[in-house]
Image (cartoon, rainbow, N blue to C red):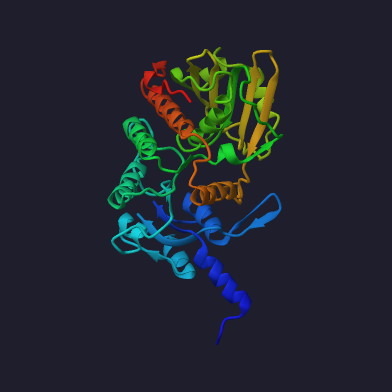
Amino acid sequence: MPLSRRAFLAALAAENRPKVACILNVYFPNSHADVFMSRLLEGYRLNGASHRPRVQTVSLYVDQFPPNDMAREQAAEYGIRIYPSVKEALCLGGATLAVDGVAVIGEHGDYPRTARGNFQYPRKKRFDEVTAVFQQNNRVLPLMNDKYFAYEWADARAMYDRVKRDRIPFFCGSSLPLTWRRPALEFQPGIELDELLAVSFSDLEEHGYHAIELLQAMAEKRKGGETGIAEIRCVEGDAVFTDPFWSRALLDAALRHRVNHVPKNNTPPQAIFVRYNDGVKASILNLNAQARDYLFAAREKSGKLHSSCFYIQLYNHNHWGFMVRHFEDVVLSKRSPYPPERTLLSNGIMLAGLESRVTGHAWLPTPHLNIRY
């Protein structure tokens, strides 16, 4: 039976979309792979408008298949092949690159933690496998790396250096700098800041990282741009609320914007304190007993306070539409949406904070974080 005109045009549009490969740790309900892939495959809604996929997912590599695996069923549903290696996923089983972009979703799965508390997600391994195919083909493709670079600083730095050296169109980091801000809050470049604070909840490594990167997305707007970090410290328990490093007024301002219900609990607080090279102070407070939102506050040198909730729709994950949109934009434009230095520096803050936690909660000098951008 011949195709209708509508079906023919739909098929033609699908054929003309850029083709992408997705490299996943694992794909189960509510995992990063699920909330990303469901929107990449079917489209998404943002701010009352529907957006159809602008790229076509044609291949997958999946590292683990737990009992609640979704990868096999989704691949069958959408006619996508799961390949046994990253190289085959990028080359569609052939000898040369056969896609136009790559997304690496290296979160979740059954992987051990380091002594400092980082999950040993194989992001560096996947990055090396992807970029090895780039090198073999003597060209680069737009590449997404979900969340931070790597669980070891040397690996994170090596990934960043290769992105810069090879001029890879690159999209990385947390969804939090991209999501809604309630109330709306955007700093103009050159703002003179004195102190910043962000609030997170749940696991310090997994979820505290998101607060770190949302904070850095705001801090980098200050006068003089980013100048790097001098030292970092982790504090836990009751000492968080008695430490003179941070200002309670900032926390009060941030907490006023909570949206989600907080179940009653007595989980001890945690904090990562950051002293920038230019003297600005920042605190990331992980407050399971007080928040189920990502919150932000800052004080200008004039004394003026700013605060907002970086809102995520906690149970339906619609903020992931922003991640899909940015990935599509990178594939289509071949341009990075913002400096990867933001994620590199945030990665370094998280690693140093966790290191301080297991080394007596001392201030740790961070000369390796003298990163300017």
Identify the residue at horizontal 50%, vertical 67% (top origin): 15
Which quarter of the image is occupied by the N terminus?
A: bottom right
Residue 366: image quadrant is: top left
Left or right of 82 on screen, residue 42: right
Residue 356 locus on image (x, y percent): 40, 22
Q: Above or below — where is 237 with respect to 325? A: above
Q: Residue furthest front?
A: 138
Left or right of 103 on screen, residue 122: left
Residue 228 locus on image (x, y percent): 46, 20
Residue 327 versus residue 358: which sits nearer the camera?
A: 327
Residue 283: image quadrant is: top right
Residue 213 versus residue 337: which sits nearer the camera?
A: 337
Q: Above or below — where is 371 with respect to 69? A: above
Residue 239 locus on image (x, y percent): 51, 17
Residue 128 versus residue 317: which sits nearer the camera?
A: 128
Total marks placed: 0
Q: Residue furthest bottom?
A: 1
Residue 65 in view here: no
Residue 236 versus residue 48: which sits nearer the camera?
A: 48
Residue 235 locus on image (x, y percent): 47, 21
Left or right of 114 on screen, residue 276: right
Identify the residue at horizontal 36%, vertical 40% (top origin): 166
Residue 244 in view here: yes
Left or right of 104 on screen, residue 50: right
